[in-house]
Image (spheres, helix red, strand yellow):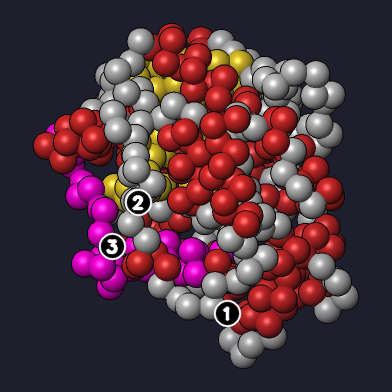
């Protein structure tokens, strides 16, 4: 069973999804591909990737692989395609399960098939010229299908498109979100240990109150979170990126670098440089830049791409080649068996020691993302190259 995740952080809703996925598929193993130091909405993850991977293992996953940041800080379609490519390259996946707002696979598959027909594309350009973002323009051009109205449905549709394009014979399940909606910012009353809140609400409460709302996280994950906090490896929030961004935007050549990023374009770059002269925080910069055409997440992604010097040329190359490796973050005792199968059946190298990959640009981009993330910790780690020194976390915690 494959799961595509971010676990930012791992909460009770994720635990329920993982257990339901196991029940529905009767799978022998659960393999997660997870965003690393940054997440798809263009933010640093609230905790380092090794801690989040350990939390997933503690909650019942068997193996956690990292999705390279080259596919994380991208649109939903590229994120989904990269994650499916990682899972397919393991050679062991037979099932995929994802969460959705609809909870029904057939409507999502129908929209995925319609998107592949391409008849809607002729209207998208005109809608974009009217000031709509691409996701909104596509939604309107296709006569507002419910499947393209909410984040998890959109990702689910893109997973299905990638699976079809790659001709994978996987059995696919979708599980509806339970209790909390994706954008919910407030925690529900914690009447029982299994109370589910959105990851957005968990992060917001953590930032406002200064402590993690443990009632909304599975008990087996608590020790890993608490250890990370005690060691100063989290939590990380967006505002800590602001000084780095301001400094970079004031450098010679910053405008050219921003234009060369994956999602950089002249009108957006102009808005960012106009806004940065008056903004006093990351959030204010994004708010001043935002329009109907430029969504909050797209602006955040392009700023993170800029900080990592992630260029359009690189992205285009990797869109053709796909992920270059299977980066192991954590595994359980049972996961050892699965790793043996991946080594035999996988079509990409399973990376447990990163030193031989030191000069591979895709891996170096991951390393740079980790270095930047570590500088945002409450107790920053000034030494670069953490990715070259951290090994996967096994069942003994080593």
Q: Which residue is at a point 62% across and 62% down the rendered structure image?
A: 232
The residue carrying mark 1 is 256
Secondary structure, mark 1, is helix
The residue carrying mark 3 is 354
Q: Nearer the viewer, residue 377 or 245?
A: 377
- Find residue 273 and report its horizontal and vertical position in percent: 75, 75
Q: Which residue is at a point 64% across and 80% down the rendered structure image?
A: 248
- Find residue 23 and report its horizontal and vertical position in percent: 44, 10
Q: Earlier in the sequence, mark 3 or mark 1?
A: 1
Q: Residues within 10 Å of mark 2 (few under 14, many from 20)?
A: few
Q: Tell me how far mark 3 sits from mark 2, CA to CA.
A: 16 Å
Q: Residues within 10 Å of mark 3 (few under 14, many from 20)?
A: some
- Find residue 63 and report its horizontal and vertical position in percent: 35, 36
Q: In front: mark 2 or mark 1?
A: 2
Q: Which residue is at a point 54% across and 31% down the rendered structure image?
A: 220
Q: Nearer the viewer, residue 260 or 395?
A: 395
Q: Is residue 130 magenta?
A: no
The residue carrying mark 2 is 398
Q: Earlier in the sequence, mark 3 or mark 2?
A: 3
Q: Is residue 203 above or below residue 257?
A: above
Q: Quadrant of the N terminus?
A: top left
Query: On the picture, is 305 further left or further right than 135?
Result: left
Secondary structure, mark 2, is loop
Q: Is residue 292 visible?
A: no
Question: Which image quadrant is residue 250 in?
Answer: bottom right
Q: Residues within 10 Å of mark 1 (few under 14, many from 20)?
A: few
**Magenta residues (range):** 345-373
Q: Which residue is at a point 72% across and 44% down the rendered structure image?
A: 212
């Amino acid at each position: 069973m494959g799961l595509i995740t971010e676990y930012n952080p791992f909460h009770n809703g994720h635990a329920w999804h993982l257990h339901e996925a196991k029940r529905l598929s009767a799978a022998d193993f659960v393999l997660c591909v997870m965003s690393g130091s940054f997440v798809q909405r263009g933010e640093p993850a609230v905790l380092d990737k090794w801690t989040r991977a350990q939390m997933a293992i503690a909650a019942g996953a068997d193996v956690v692989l990292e999705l390279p940041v080259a596919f994380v800080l991208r649109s939903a379609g590229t994120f989904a395609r990269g994650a499916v490519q990682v899972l397919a390259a393991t050679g062991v996946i037979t099932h995929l399960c994802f969460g959705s707002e609809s909870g029904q696979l057939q409507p999502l598959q129908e929209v995925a098939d319609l998107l592949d027909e391409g008849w809607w594309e002729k209207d998208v350009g005109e809608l974009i010229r009217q000031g709509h973002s691409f996701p909104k323009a596509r939604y309107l051009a296709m006569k507002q299908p419910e499947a393209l109205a909410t984040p998890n449905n959109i990702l689910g549709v893109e997973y299905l498109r990638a699976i079809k394009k790659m001709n994978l014979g996987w059995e696919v399940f979708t599980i509806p979100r339970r209790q909390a909606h994706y954008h919910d910012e407030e925690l529900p009353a914690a009447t029982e240990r299994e109370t589910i809140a959105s990851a957005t609400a968990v992060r917001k409460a953590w930032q406002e109150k200064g402590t993690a709302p443990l009632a909304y996280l599975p008990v087996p994950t608590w020790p890993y979170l608490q250890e990370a906090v005690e060691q100063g490896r989290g939590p990380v929030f967006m505002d800590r990126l602001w000084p780095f961004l301001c400094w970079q935007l004031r450098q010679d050549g910053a405008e050219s670098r921003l234009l060369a990023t994956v999602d950089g374009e002249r009108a957006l770059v102009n808005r960012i440089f106009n806004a940065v002269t008056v903004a006093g925080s990351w959030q204010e910069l994004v708010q001043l830049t935002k329009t109907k055409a430029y969504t909050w997440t797209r602006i955040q992604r392009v700023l993170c791409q800029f900080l990592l010097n992630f260029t359009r040329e690189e992205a285009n190359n990797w869109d053709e080649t796909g992920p270059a490796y299977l980066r192991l973050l954590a595994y359980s005792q049972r996961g050892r068996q699965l790793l043996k199968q991946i080594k035999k059946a996988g079509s990409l190298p399973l990376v447990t020691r990163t030193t031989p990959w030191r000069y591979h640009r895709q891996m170096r981009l991951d390393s740079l993302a980790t270095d930047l993330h570590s500088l945002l910790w409450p107790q920053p780690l000034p030494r670069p190259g953490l990715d070259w020194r951290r090994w996967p976390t096994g069942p003994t915690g080593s």
